[in-house]
Image (cartoon, rainbow, N blue to C red):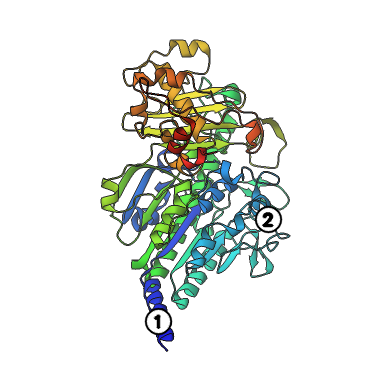
Protein backbone atom coordinates (compact mmCIF):
# COMPACT_ATOMS: atom_id res chain seq x y z
CA UNK A 1 0.00 0.00 0.00
CA UNK A 2 2.85 2.35 0.95
CA UNK A 3 4.65 1.52 -2.31
CA UNK A 4 1.51 2.37 -4.30
CA UNK A 5 1.24 5.73 -2.49
CA UNK A 6 4.87 6.52 -3.32
CA UNK A 7 4.28 5.72 -6.99
CA UNK A 8 1.20 7.95 -7.06
CA UNK A 9 3.17 10.77 -5.44
CA UNK A 10 6.01 10.38 -7.92
CA UNK A 11 3.56 10.41 -10.81
CA UNK A 12 2.00 13.62 -9.45
CA UNK A 13 5.41 15.28 -9.12
CA UNK A 14 6.31 14.26 -12.66
CA UNK A 15 3.03 15.67 -13.97
CA UNK A 16 3.67 18.97 -12.14
CA UNK A 17 7.21 19.19 -13.50
CA UNK A 18 6.02 18.60 -17.05
CA UNK A 19 3.26 21.18 -16.63
CA UNK A 20 5.90 23.76 -15.67
CA UNK A 21 8.16 22.83 -18.57
CA UNK A 22 8.15 25.34 -21.45
CA UNK A 23 7.68 24.64 -25.14
CA UNK A 24 10.28 25.35 -27.84
CA UNK A 25 9.74 26.13 -31.51
CA UNK A 26 12.66 26.32 -33.94
CA UNK A 27 12.14 27.90 -37.36
CA UNK A 28 15.02 27.17 -39.73
CA UNK A 29 15.13 28.88 -43.13
CA UNK A 30 17.12 27.38 -46.00
CA UNK A 31 20.07 29.52 -47.25
CA UNK A 32 19.48 32.81 -45.41
CA UNK A 33 22.53 34.90 -44.55
CA UNK A 34 22.61 37.33 -41.65
CA UNK A 35 20.86 40.65 -42.13
CA UNK A 36 24.05 42.72 -42.33
CA UNK A 37 25.14 40.78 -45.42
CA UNK A 38 22.07 40.19 -47.60
CA UNK A 39 19.54 42.57 -46.04
CA UNK A 40 16.99 39.78 -45.60
CA UNK A 41 15.42 40.98 -42.34
CA UNK A 42 14.22 44.13 -44.09
CA UNK A 43 11.38 42.04 -45.57
CA UNK A 44 10.53 40.32 -42.26
CA UNK A 45 8.52 42.82 -40.16
CA UNK A 46 6.85 40.00 -38.22
CA UNK A 47 10.15 38.40 -37.25
CA UNK A 48 11.36 41.83 -36.15
CA UNK A 49 8.30 42.76 -34.08
CA UNK A 50 7.41 39.30 -32.72
CA UNK A 51 10.86 37.83 -32.09
CA UNK A 52 13.66 40.43 -32.34
CA UNK A 53 11.83 43.20 -30.46
CA UNK A 54 10.67 40.74 -27.81
CA UNK A 55 13.94 38.91 -27.41
CA UNK A 56 17.62 38.65 -28.31
CA UNK A 57 19.32 39.04 -31.68
CA UNK A 58 22.67 37.22 -31.70
CA UNK A 59 24.86 39.09 -34.16
CA UNK A 60 27.74 36.60 -34.17
CA UNK A 61 26.14 33.26 -34.85
CA UNK A 62 27.65 30.87 -37.40
CA UNK A 63 27.05 27.62 -39.17
CA UNK A 64 30.06 25.32 -39.01
CA UNK A 65 29.52 23.87 -42.49
CA UNK A 66 28.00 26.10 -45.18
CA UNK A 67 26.04 23.21 -46.68
CA UNK A 68 22.49 21.99 -45.98
CA UNK A 69 22.73 18.48 -44.58
CA UNK A 70 26.00 18.70 -42.57
CA UNK A 71 24.76 21.93 -40.98
CA UNK A 72 21.39 20.43 -40.00
CA UNK A 73 23.08 17.36 -38.52
CA UNK A 74 25.44 19.65 -36.62
CA UNK A 75 22.39 21.42 -35.16
CA UNK A 76 20.49 18.23 -34.29
CA UNK A 77 23.44 16.49 -32.61
CA UNK A 78 25.47 19.28 -30.97
CA UNK A 79 28.54 17.75 -32.62
CA UNK A 80 30.97 19.11 -35.19
CA UNK A 81 30.77 17.61 -38.68
CA UNK A 82 34.17 15.98 -38.28
CA UNK A 83 32.66 14.00 -35.38
CA UNK A 84 29.40 13.04 -37.08
CA UNK A 85 31.25 12.49 -40.39
CA UNK A 86 28.16 13.71 -42.22
CA UNK A 87 30.06 16.07 -44.49
CA UNK A 88 28.06 16.04 -47.74
CA UNK A 89 24.59 15.74 -49.21
CA UNK A 90 24.63 12.19 -50.53
CA UNK A 91 26.15 8.80 -49.77
CA UNK A 92 28.83 7.83 -49.05
CA UNK A 93 29.74 11.11 -47.31
CA UNK A 94 26.41 12.61 -46.33
CA UNK A 95 22.65 12.76 -46.49
CA UNK A 96 20.07 10.71 -44.60
CA UNK A 97 21.76 7.34 -45.41
CA UNK A 98 25.05 8.49 -43.86
CA UNK A 99 23.20 9.85 -40.81
CA UNK A 100 21.60 6.44 -40.27
CA UNK A 101 24.81 4.50 -40.93
CA UNK A 102 26.65 6.59 -38.34
CA UNK A 103 24.11 5.52 -35.70
CA UNK A 104 22.89 9.10 -35.25
CA UNK A 105 19.20 8.27 -35.79
CA UNK A 106 19.26 6.74 -32.30
CA UNK A 107 21.16 9.56 -30.66
CA UNK A 108 20.01 13.07 -31.51
CA UNK A 109 17.81 15.89 -30.24
CA UNK A 110 14.25 14.49 -30.68
CA UNK A 111 15.25 11.16 -29.12
CA UNK A 112 16.64 12.88 -26.03
CA UNK A 113 13.59 15.13 -25.72
CA UNK A 114 11.11 12.31 -26.26
CA UNK A 115 12.88 10.23 -23.61
CA UNK A 116 12.34 13.18 -21.24
CA UNK A 117 8.58 13.12 -21.80
CA UNK A 118 8.44 15.95 -24.33
CA UNK A 119 6.36 15.64 -27.49
CA UNK A 120 8.27 16.37 -30.69
CA UNK A 121 7.01 17.46 -34.13
CA UNK A 122 8.75 18.22 -37.42
CA UNK A 123 7.50 19.99 -40.57
CA UNK A 124 9.40 20.68 -43.78
CA UNK A 125 12.83 19.92 -45.16
CA UNK A 126 14.69 17.35 -43.08
CA UNK A 127 17.83 16.06 -44.79
CA UNK A 128 19.16 15.56 -48.27
CA UNK A 129 18.79 12.09 -49.81
CA UNK A 130 15.66 11.58 -47.71
CA UNK A 131 13.40 10.15 -50.41
CA UNK A 132 10.12 8.51 -51.30
CA UNK A 133 12.02 5.20 -51.25
CA UNK A 134 13.85 5.39 -47.90
CA UNK A 135 11.79 7.68 -45.64
CA UNK A 136 10.69 4.71 -43.52
CA UNK A 137 13.86 2.58 -43.94
CA UNK A 138 14.21 3.40 -41.10
CA UNK A 139 11.83 6.13 -40.00
CA UNK A 140 13.40 9.10 -38.21
CA UNK A 141 13.38 8.23 -34.51
CA UNK A 142 12.21 10.42 -31.67
CA UNK A 143 9.43 12.33 -33.42
CA UNK A 144 5.94 12.13 -31.96
CA UNK A 145 4.72 13.08 -35.42
CA UNK A 146 6.41 14.39 -38.54
CA UNK A 147 5.62 15.47 -42.07
CA UNK A 148 8.79 15.93 -44.10
CA UNK A 149 9.58 16.89 -47.66
CA UNK A 150 10.76 13.96 -49.75
CA UNK A 151 13.12 13.92 -52.71
CA UNK A 152 12.66 14.17 -55.67
CA UNK A 153 9.97 16.72 -54.70
CA UNK A 154 11.77 18.49 -51.86
CA UNK A 155 12.69 21.62 -53.85
CA UNK A 156 9.82 21.53 -56.34
CA UNK A 157 7.82 24.44 -54.90
CA UNK A 158 4.61 23.81 -56.84
CA UNK A 159 4.79 20.00 -56.99
CA UNK A 160 6.22 19.00 -53.64
CA UNK A 161 6.15 15.49 -52.19
CA UNK A 162 5.61 14.78 -48.48
CA UNK A 163 5.14 11.94 -46.09
CA UNK A 164 1.87 11.82 -44.20
CA UNK A 165 2.35 9.04 -41.69
CA UNK A 166 3.59 6.05 -43.67
CA UNK A 167 2.20 7.36 -46.98
CA UNK A 168 3.84 9.32 -49.78
CA UNK A 169 1.59 12.24 -50.77
CA UNK A 170 2.11 14.45 -53.81
CA UNK A 171 0.89 18.05 -53.69
CA UNK A 172 0.63 19.33 -57.28
CA UNK A 173 -0.34 22.96 -57.81
CA UNK A 174 -0.06 23.99 -54.15
CA UNK A 175 2.84 26.16 -53.02
CA UNK A 176 5.09 24.32 -50.57
CA UNK A 177 5.03 27.25 -48.12
CA UNK A 178 1.22 27.03 -47.89
CA UNK A 179 1.50 23.33 -47.10
CA UNK A 180 4.20 24.02 -44.50
CA UNK A 181 1.95 26.62 -42.86
CA UNK A 182 -1.05 24.29 -42.69
CA UNK A 183 0.92 21.36 -41.28
CA UNK A 184 2.60 23.59 -38.69
CA UNK A 185 -0.72 24.95 -37.41
CA UNK A 186 -2.16 21.45 -37.27
CA UNK A 187 0.74 20.26 -35.11
CA UNK A 188 0.24 23.23 -32.79
CA UNK A 189 -3.42 22.18 -32.43
CA UNK A 190 -2.27 18.61 -31.69
CA UNK A 191 0.28 19.82 -29.13
CA UNK A 192 -2.29 22.01 -27.38
CA UNK A 193 -4.74 19.12 -27.19
CA UNK A 194 -2.08 16.77 -25.80
CA UNK A 195 -1.39 19.21 -22.94
CA UNK A 196 2.28 18.22 -22.75
CA UNK A 197 5.43 20.29 -23.29
CA UNK A 198 6.46 20.11 -26.91
CA UNK A 199 9.30 20.78 -29.32
CA UNK A 200 8.30 21.81 -32.84
CA UNK A 201 10.79 22.29 -35.67
CA UNK A 202 9.58 24.07 -38.78
CA UNK A 203 11.95 23.99 -41.76
CA UNK A 204 10.55 25.75 -44.84
CA UNK A 205 12.48 25.10 -48.03
CA UNK A 206 12.54 28.84 -48.77
CA UNK A 207 14.51 30.74 -49.93
CA UNK A 208 16.42 27.84 -51.56
CA UNK A 209 16.36 27.78 -55.36
CA UNK A 210 13.64 25.66 -56.90
CA UNK A 211 14.80 22.36 -58.44
CA UNK A 212 11.98 20.66 -60.30
CA UNK A 213 11.65 16.91 -60.49
CA UNK A 214 12.91 17.09 -64.07
CA UNK A 215 16.09 18.81 -62.88
CA UNK A 216 15.33 22.37 -63.98
CA UNK A 217 16.70 25.08 -61.66
CA UNK A 218 14.56 28.20 -61.14
CA UNK A 219 14.34 31.19 -58.87
CA UNK A 220 12.13 30.26 -55.88
CA UNK A 221 8.53 30.99 -56.91
CA UNK A 222 6.81 33.23 -54.33
CA UNK A 223 3.49 32.73 -52.63
CA UNK A 224 0.72 34.64 -54.47
CA UNK A 225 0.70 37.35 -51.79
CA UNK A 226 4.36 38.14 -52.49
CA UNK A 227 4.21 38.22 -56.30
CA UNK A 228 5.59 41.44 -57.73
CA UNK A 229 7.17 42.59 -54.48
CA UNK A 230 10.74 43.92 -54.28
CA UNK A 231 11.27 44.22 -58.03
CA UNK A 232 13.45 47.26 -57.36
CA UNK A 233 15.78 45.45 -54.93
CA UNK A 234 19.30 44.46 -55.94
CA UNK A 235 21.93 42.41 -54.14
CA UNK A 236 23.87 44.56 -51.63
CA UNK A 237 26.95 46.18 -53.17
CA UNK A 238 29.55 45.38 -50.53
CA UNK A 239 33.26 45.91 -51.20
CA UNK A 240 33.60 42.30 -52.30
CA UNK A 241 30.74 42.55 -54.85
CA UNK A 242 32.18 41.42 -58.21
CA UNK A 243 35.44 43.26 -57.47
CA UNK A 244 37.79 44.59 -60.14
CA UNK A 245 40.65 42.73 -58.45
CA UNK A 246 40.08 39.09 -57.51
CA UNK A 247 40.05 38.10 -53.86
CA UNK A 248 40.25 35.03 -51.69
CA UNK A 249 42.54 32.03 -52.13
CA UNK A 250 42.82 28.73 -54.01
CA UNK A 251 40.37 28.51 -56.92
CA UNK A 252 38.38 31.55 -55.72
CA UNK A 253 41.39 33.79 -56.36
CA UNK A 254 41.32 32.74 -60.02
CA UNK A 255 37.67 33.54 -60.71
CA UNK A 256 37.00 35.84 -63.63
CA UNK A 257 34.92 38.95 -63.14
CA UNK A 258 31.19 38.37 -63.66
CA UNK A 259 29.57 39.76 -66.78
CA UNK A 260 26.87 42.42 -66.64
CA UNK A 261 24.34 39.75 -67.60
CA UNK A 262 25.41 37.54 -64.71
CA UNK A 263 25.23 40.44 -62.25
CA UNK A 264 21.70 41.31 -63.42
CA UNK A 265 20.64 37.69 -63.07
CA UNK A 266 22.02 37.69 -59.53
CA UNK A 267 20.04 40.83 -58.73
CA UNK A 268 16.84 39.24 -60.05
CA UNK A 269 17.63 36.17 -57.97
CA UNK A 270 18.08 38.35 -54.88
CA UNK A 271 14.65 39.95 -55.39
CA UNK A 272 13.09 36.52 -55.86
CA UNK A 273 14.71 35.27 -52.64
CA UNK A 274 13.33 38.26 -50.74
CA UNK A 275 9.82 37.39 -51.95
CA UNK A 276 10.35 33.84 -50.74
CA UNK A 277 11.66 35.04 -47.36
CA UNK A 278 8.61 37.30 -47.00
CA UNK A 279 6.49 34.14 -47.17
CA UNK A 280 8.35 32.76 -44.14
CA UNK A 281 7.68 36.02 -42.34
CA UNK A 282 3.94 35.60 -42.88
CA UNK A 283 4.23 32.08 -41.44
CA UNK A 284 5.86 33.44 -38.27
CA UNK A 285 2.79 35.61 -37.61
CA UNK A 286 0.50 32.60 -38.15
CA UNK A 287 2.50 30.64 -35.59
CA UNK A 288 2.42 33.41 -32.98
CA UNK A 289 -1.31 33.99 -33.52
CA UNK A 290 -1.98 30.28 -33.03
CA UNK A 291 0.10 30.24 -29.84
CA UNK A 292 -1.93 33.19 -28.55
CA UNK A 293 -5.18 31.49 -29.45
CA UNK A 294 -4.16 28.34 -27.61
CA UNK A 295 -2.81 30.35 -24.64
CA UNK A 296 0.66 28.88 -25.18
CA UNK A 297 2.66 31.96 -26.17
CA UNK A 298 3.75 33.04 -22.68
CA UNK A 299 5.35 29.65 -22.05
CA UNK A 300 6.95 29.10 -25.46
CA UNK A 301 10.44 29.90 -26.70
CA UNK A 302 10.73 30.74 -30.40
CA UNK A 303 14.11 30.46 -32.12
CA UNK A 304 14.66 31.74 -35.66
CA UNK A 305 17.73 30.76 -37.70
CA UNK A 306 18.94 29.31 -41.01
CA UNK A 307 20.99 26.25 -41.98
CA UNK A 308 23.68 28.30 -43.76
CA UNK A 309 24.28 31.63 -45.43
CA UNK A 310 24.47 32.64 -49.07
CA UNK A 311 26.49 34.77 -51.48
CA UNK A 312 25.37 36.63 -54.61
CA UNK A 313 28.19 37.98 -56.80
CA UNK A 314 30.50 38.33 -53.78
CA UNK A 315 34.13 37.49 -54.55
CA UNK A 316 33.10 37.12 -58.23
CA UNK A 317 31.00 34.07 -57.30
CA UNK A 318 27.68 33.20 -58.90
CA UNK A 319 24.84 32.76 -56.38
CA UNK A 320 25.48 29.92 -53.95
CA UNK A 321 27.15 28.89 -50.69
CA UNK A 322 29.86 26.34 -49.74
CA UNK A 323 32.57 28.91 -49.03
CA UNK A 324 34.04 30.10 -45.74
CA UNK A 325 33.42 33.79 -46.32
CA UNK A 326 31.18 35.75 -44.00
CA UNK A 327 28.24 35.73 -46.43
CA UNK A 328 28.14 31.91 -46.30
CA UNK A 329 28.78 31.24 -42.62
CA UNK A 330 27.21 34.19 -40.73
CA UNK A 331 23.53 33.44 -40.20
CA UNK A 332 20.58 34.83 -38.22
CA UNK A 333 19.84 33.69 -34.69
CA UNK A 334 16.96 35.30 -32.78
CA UNK A 335 15.28 34.03 -29.63
CA UNK A 336 12.29 35.08 -27.57
CA UNK A 337 10.41 33.46 -24.73
CA UNK A 338 9.86 33.42 -20.97
CA UNK A 339 12.63 35.18 -19.05
CA UNK A 340 14.44 36.45 -22.14
CA UNK A 341 15.25 40.19 -22.15
CA UNK A 342 13.56 42.24 -24.87
CA UNK A 343 15.14 44.23 -27.69
CA UNK A 344 18.57 42.93 -26.76
CA UNK A 345 21.48 42.57 -29.18
CA UNK A 346 24.26 40.19 -28.20
CA UNK A 347 27.78 39.91 -29.60
CA UNK A 348 28.67 36.64 -27.88
CA UNK A 349 30.07 34.07 -30.30
CA UNK A 350 27.97 30.97 -31.00
CA UNK A 351 27.37 28.33 -33.65
CA UNK A 352 24.86 25.64 -34.57
CA UNK A 353 26.91 23.25 -32.42
CA UNK A 354 25.56 25.16 -29.42
CA UNK A 355 21.83 25.00 -30.22
CA UNK A 356 21.11 21.42 -29.11
CA UNK A 357 22.74 22.09 -25.70
CA UNK A 358 20.74 25.33 -25.45
CA UNK A 359 17.43 23.62 -26.26
CA UNK A 360 18.08 20.93 -23.64
CA UNK A 361 18.77 23.71 -21.15
CA UNK A 362 15.49 25.45 -22.03
CA UNK A 363 13.63 22.22 -21.31
CA UNK A 364 15.60 21.48 -18.14
CA UNK A 365 17.00 18.28 -19.66
CA UNK A 366 20.57 17.33 -18.59
CA UNK A 367 23.43 18.07 -20.99
CA UNK A 368 25.04 15.28 -23.00
CA UNK A 369 28.64 14.45 -22.01
CA UNK A 370 29.74 14.15 -25.65
CA UNK A 371 28.52 17.57 -26.82
CA UNK A 372 31.04 19.64 -28.77
CA UNK A 373 28.95 22.76 -28.12
CA UNK A 374 27.77 24.58 -25.02
CA UNK A 375 24.68 26.48 -23.86
CA UNK A 376 24.19 29.94 -25.41
CA UNK A 377 23.46 32.54 -22.73
CA UNK A 378 19.89 33.87 -22.91
CA UNK A 379 19.13 35.55 -19.57
CA UNK A 380 20.16 38.99 -18.33
CA UNK A 381 22.55 37.70 -15.70
CA UNK A 382 24.10 35.07 -17.98
CA UNK A 383 24.64 37.60 -20.76
CA UNK A 384 26.31 40.07 -18.37
CA UNK A 385 28.63 37.42 -16.91
CA UNK A 386 29.34 35.56 -20.14
CA UNK A 387 32.78 34.00 -20.57
CA UNK A 388 32.02 32.64 -23.99
CA UNK A 389 34.47 30.94 -26.27
CA UNK A 390 36.03 33.21 -28.87
CA UNK A 391 36.44 30.73 -31.72
CA UNK A 392 34.15 28.81 -34.09
CA UNK A 393 35.59 26.05 -36.24
CA UNK A 394 34.25 25.94 -39.81
CA UNK A 395 35.10 23.37 -42.49
CA UNK A 396 34.08 22.06 -45.89
CA UNK A 397 34.77 18.79 -47.70
CA UNK A 398 32.67 18.68 -50.88
CA UNK A 399 33.63 19.91 -54.35
CA UNK A 400 32.29 23.20 -55.65
CA UNK A 401 30.55 23.07 -59.01
CA UNK A 402 30.54 26.28 -61.05
CA UNK A 403 27.61 26.62 -63.45
CA UNK A 404 27.41 28.97 -66.38
CA UNK A 405 23.84 29.43 -65.28
CA UNK A 406 22.95 33.09 -65.35
CA UNK A 407 19.25 32.62 -66.13
CA UNK A 408 18.60 29.88 -63.58
CA UNK A 409 17.80 27.17 -66.04
CA UNK A 410 19.14 23.67 -66.42
CA UNK A 411 22.79 23.86 -67.40
CA UNK A 412 25.98 21.85 -67.63
CA UNK A 413 28.59 22.32 -64.90
CA UNK A 414 31.49 24.35 -66.22
CA UNK A 415 34.11 23.12 -63.77
CA UNK A 416 34.48 21.20 -60.53
CA UNK A 417 36.83 22.66 -57.92
CA UNK A 418 38.45 20.92 -54.98
CA UNK A 419 36.61 22.88 -52.32
CA UNK A 420 38.12 21.40 -49.17
CA UNK A 421 39.19 23.81 -46.45
CA UNK A 422 39.28 24.23 -42.68
CA UNK A 423 39.05 27.55 -40.90
CA UNK A 424 38.50 29.38 -37.65
CA UNK A 425 36.35 32.45 -37.10
CA UNK A 426 37.89 34.16 -34.09
CA UNK A 427 36.24 37.08 -32.31
CA UNK A 428 38.08 38.43 -29.29
CA UNK A 429 38.00 41.54 -27.14
CA UNK A 430 41.23 42.57 -28.87
CA UNK A 431 40.58 41.68 -32.49
CA UNK A 432 38.32 40.00 -35.02
CA UNK A 433 39.97 37.44 -37.34
CA UNK A 434 39.38 34.77 -39.98
CA UNK A 435 42.06 32.18 -40.75
CA UNK A 436 41.73 29.37 -43.28
CA UNK A 437 43.87 26.61 -44.78
CA UNK A 438 42.89 24.86 -48.02
CA UNK A 439 43.73 21.31 -49.01
CA UNK A 440 45.97 22.60 -51.83
CA UNK A 441 48.09 24.52 -49.32
CA UNK A 442 46.54 27.95 -49.95
CA UNK A 443 45.93 30.09 -46.86
CA UNK A 444 43.80 33.10 -45.94
CA UNK A 445 43.91 35.63 -43.15
CA UNK A 446 41.61 38.60 -42.69
CA UNK A 447 41.64 41.23 -39.99
CA UNK A 448 37.85 41.58 -39.93
CA UNK A 449 37.99 44.90 -38.08
CA UNK A 450 39.82 46.47 -41.03
CA UNK A 451 38.67 44.19 -43.85
CA UNK A 452 35.19 42.82 -43.10
CA UNK A 453 34.66 42.24 -46.83
CA UNK A 454 37.62 39.83 -46.82
CA UNK A 455 39.27 41.40 -49.84
CA UNK A 456 42.96 41.71 -48.90
CA UNK A 457 44.55 38.35 -48.07
CA UNK A 458 48.17 38.88 -46.96
CA UNK A 459 48.85 35.15 -47.28
CA UNK A 460 47.87 35.03 -50.96
CA UNK A 461 51.49 35.31 -52.15
CA UNK A 462 54.91 35.52 -50.45
CA UNK A 463 55.15 39.10 -51.70
CA UNK A 464 51.82 40.04 -50.09
CA UNK A 465 52.90 38.43 -46.81
CA UNK A 466 56.20 40.28 -46.78
CA UNK A 467 54.46 43.58 -47.47
CA UNK A 468 51.99 43.12 -44.59
CA UNK A 469 53.50 45.09 -41.70
CA UNK A 470 50.64 45.34 -39.21
CA UNK A 471 51.38 44.14 -35.67
CA UNK A 472 49.01 42.50 -33.20
CA UNK A 473 49.22 42.76 -29.42
CA UNK A 474 52.46 44.72 -30.13
CA UNK A 475 53.83 41.55 -31.70
CA UNK A 476 54.81 40.78 -35.32
CA UNK A 477 52.13 39.37 -37.62
CA UNK A 478 54.10 36.12 -37.91
CA UNK A 479 53.62 35.48 -34.18
CA UNK A 480 49.84 35.84 -34.51
CA UNK A 481 49.87 33.32 -37.37
CA UNK A 482 51.63 30.65 -35.32
CA UNK A 483 48.90 30.94 -32.69
CA UNK A 484 46.10 30.81 -35.23
CA UNK A 485 47.60 27.78 -36.96
CA UNK A 486 47.85 25.90 -33.65
CA UNK A 487 44.28 26.84 -32.78
CA UNK A 488 43.10 25.54 -36.17
CA UNK A 489 45.16 22.37 -35.67
CA UNK A 490 43.25 21.76 -32.43
CA UNK A 491 39.76 22.62 -33.64
CA UNK A 492 39.86 20.74 -36.95
CA UNK A 493 39.67 17.42 -35.06
CA UNK A 494 38.48 18.59 -31.62
CA UNK A 495 35.97 16.64 -29.60
CA UNK A 496 34.01 17.50 -26.47
CA UNK A 497 36.12 19.56 -24.05
CA UNK A 498 38.73 20.34 -26.68
CA UNK A 499 36.04 22.01 -28.84
CA UNK A 500 34.62 24.01 -25.94
CA UNK A 501 38.04 24.95 -24.49
CA UNK A 502 40.58 24.52 -27.31
CA UNK A 503 43.46 26.39 -25.65
CA UNK A 504 43.44 23.88 -22.78
CA UNK A 505 44.67 21.19 -25.16
CA UNK A 506 48.05 22.94 -25.44
CA UNK A 507 47.87 24.53 -21.97
CA UNK A 508 46.07 22.02 -19.71
CA UNK A 509 47.13 23.96 -16.62
CA UNK A 510 44.66 26.70 -17.58
CA UNK A 511 47.14 29.58 -17.93
CA UNK A 512 46.02 30.27 -21.51
CA UNK A 513 42.29 30.56 -22.18
CA UNK A 514 42.17 33.25 -24.87
CA UNK A 515 44.25 34.45 -27.79
CA UNK A 516 45.42 37.42 -25.74
CA UNK A 517 47.01 35.05 -23.20
CA UNK A 518 48.66 33.00 -25.94
CA UNK A 519 50.39 36.05 -27.46
CA UNK A 520 52.87 36.29 -24.56
CA UNK A 521 56.37 36.20 -26.07
CA UNK A 522 57.46 33.42 -23.73
CA UNK A 523 55.34 31.08 -25.88
CA UNK A 524 56.97 32.05 -29.21
CA UNK A 525 59.26 29.04 -29.48
CA UNK A 526 56.53 26.67 -28.29
CA UNK A 527 54.14 27.76 -31.06
CA UNK A 528 56.89 27.86 -33.70
CA UNK A 529 57.65 24.18 -33.06
CA UNK A 530 54.02 22.99 -33.28
CA UNK A 531 53.00 20.84 -36.27
CA UNK A 532 51.42 22.88 -39.09
CA UNK A 533 47.92 22.36 -40.45
CA UNK A 534 48.02 20.15 -43.52
CA UNK A 535 45.46 17.75 -45.02
CA UNK A 536 44.47 16.08 -48.26
CA UNK A 537 41.71 16.98 -50.71
CA UNK A 538 39.27 14.25 -49.69
CA UNK A 539 35.43 14.53 -49.61
CA UNK A 540 34.96 13.36 -46.03
CA UNK A 541 36.63 13.26 -42.64
CA UNK A 542 39.19 10.50 -43.23
CA UNK A 543 41.48 10.86 -40.23
CA UNK A 544 44.50 9.14 -41.73
CA UNK A 545 44.37 11.71 -44.55
CA UNK A 546 43.63 14.73 -42.37
CA UNK A 547 47.23 15.57 -41.54
CA UNK A 548 48.72 16.22 -38.09
CA UNK A 549 46.30 16.10 -35.16
CA UNK A 550 48.18 16.01 -31.88
CA UNK A 551 49.39 19.26 -30.38
CA UNK A 552 52.44 19.50 -28.14
CA UNK A 553 51.73 20.42 -24.52
CA UNK A 554 53.41 23.45 -23.01
CA UNK A 555 55.67 22.80 -20.01
CA UNK A 556 56.99 25.82 -18.09
CA UNK A 557 60.75 26.32 -18.50
CA UNK A 558 62.86 26.30 -15.37
CA UNK A 559 60.76 23.60 -13.80
CA UNK A 560 61.38 19.91 -13.85
CA UNK A 561 60.00 18.06 -16.83
CA UNK A 562 56.73 16.35 -16.14
CA UNK A 563 56.55 12.61 -16.48
CA UNK A 564 54.23 11.05 -19.05
CA UNK A 565 51.72 10.02 -16.38
CA UNK A 566 51.59 13.58 -15.00
CA UNK A 567 51.09 15.08 -18.45
CA UNK A 568 48.32 12.64 -19.25
CA UNK A 569 46.46 13.63 -16.06
CA UNK A 570 46.55 17.27 -17.12
CA UNK A 571 45.26 16.61 -20.61
CA UNK A 572 41.58 16.94 -21.55
CA UNK A 573 39.86 13.57 -21.94
CA UNK A 574 40.02 13.80 -25.74
CA UNK A 575 43.80 13.49 -25.66
CA UNK A 576 44.07 10.71 -23.09
CA UNK A 577 45.12 7.80 -25.23
Q: Earlier in the sequence, mark 1 or mark 2?
A: 1
Foreground pick, 173 / 403: 403
Q: Name the residue at 58% across, 34% down.
A: 318
Question: Label 1: how many residues lie within 10 Å, few (<14), some (14-19) or many (20+)?
Answer: few
Give the quarter of the figure containing the N terminus.
bottom left
Tell me where residue 497 appears, x and y as whole percent: 45, 43
- Whether 9 is drawn above or below 512: the answer is below
- The Cα atoms of the two marked residues, 1 and 2, are separated by 51 Å
Which residue does the numbered mark 1 point to in the structure image?
6
**Which numbered disc, 1 or 2, marks the residue closer to the eye?**
1
- Nearest the eye: 72 or 507: 507
- Res. 469 visible in picture: yes
Residue 171 drawn above or below residue 411: below
Q: Secondary structure at mark 2?
A: loop
Instruction: Using the image, tell me which numbered label, if any, was put on residue 62.
Output: none
| Location of residue 521 by image quarter | top left
| Other-residue count near label 2 (Cα within 10 Å), few / some / many at <14 / 14–19 / ≥20 | many
Location of the C terminus (image quadrant)? top right
Q: In the image shown, does 120 or 204 lie closer to the viewer?
A: 120
Relative to 114, is 300 on the left or the right? left
Up the image or down, 528 lies above or below 337; here it is: above
Residue 310 in the image: state x and y as whole percent. 52, 40
Query: Which mark, residue 151?
Result: 2
Percent position (x, y) of residue 527? 44, 22
Determine whether, in the image, residue 191 is placed left or right of residue 547. Answer: left
Q: Residue 491: x percent and y percent?
A: 49, 35
Residue 453 visible? The answer is no
Q: Residue at x 67, y 67 (%)?
A: 169
Determine contact: label 1, label 2, CB under 8 Å.
no
Residue at 54%, 49% in the rendered image: 30
Q: Secondary structure at mark 1?
A: helix
Amino acid sequence: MRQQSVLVALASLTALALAATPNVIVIMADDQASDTLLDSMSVMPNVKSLIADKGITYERHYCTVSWCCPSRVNFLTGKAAHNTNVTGLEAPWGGWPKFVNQGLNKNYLPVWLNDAGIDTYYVGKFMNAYTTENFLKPAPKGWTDFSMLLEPGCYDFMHSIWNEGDKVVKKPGIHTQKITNEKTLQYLDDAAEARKPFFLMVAPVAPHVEITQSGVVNNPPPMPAQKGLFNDRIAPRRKNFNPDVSSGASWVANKRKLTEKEVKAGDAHHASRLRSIAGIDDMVKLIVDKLKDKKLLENTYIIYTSDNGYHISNHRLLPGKRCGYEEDISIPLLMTGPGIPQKRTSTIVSSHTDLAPTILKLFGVPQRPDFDGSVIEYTDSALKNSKRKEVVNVAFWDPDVAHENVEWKKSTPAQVYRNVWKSIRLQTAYGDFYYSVWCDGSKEFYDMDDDFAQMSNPLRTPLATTAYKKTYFSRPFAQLLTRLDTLLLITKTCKGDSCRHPWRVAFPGGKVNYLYDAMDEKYDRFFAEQPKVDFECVPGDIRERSGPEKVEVFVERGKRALGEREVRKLLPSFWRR
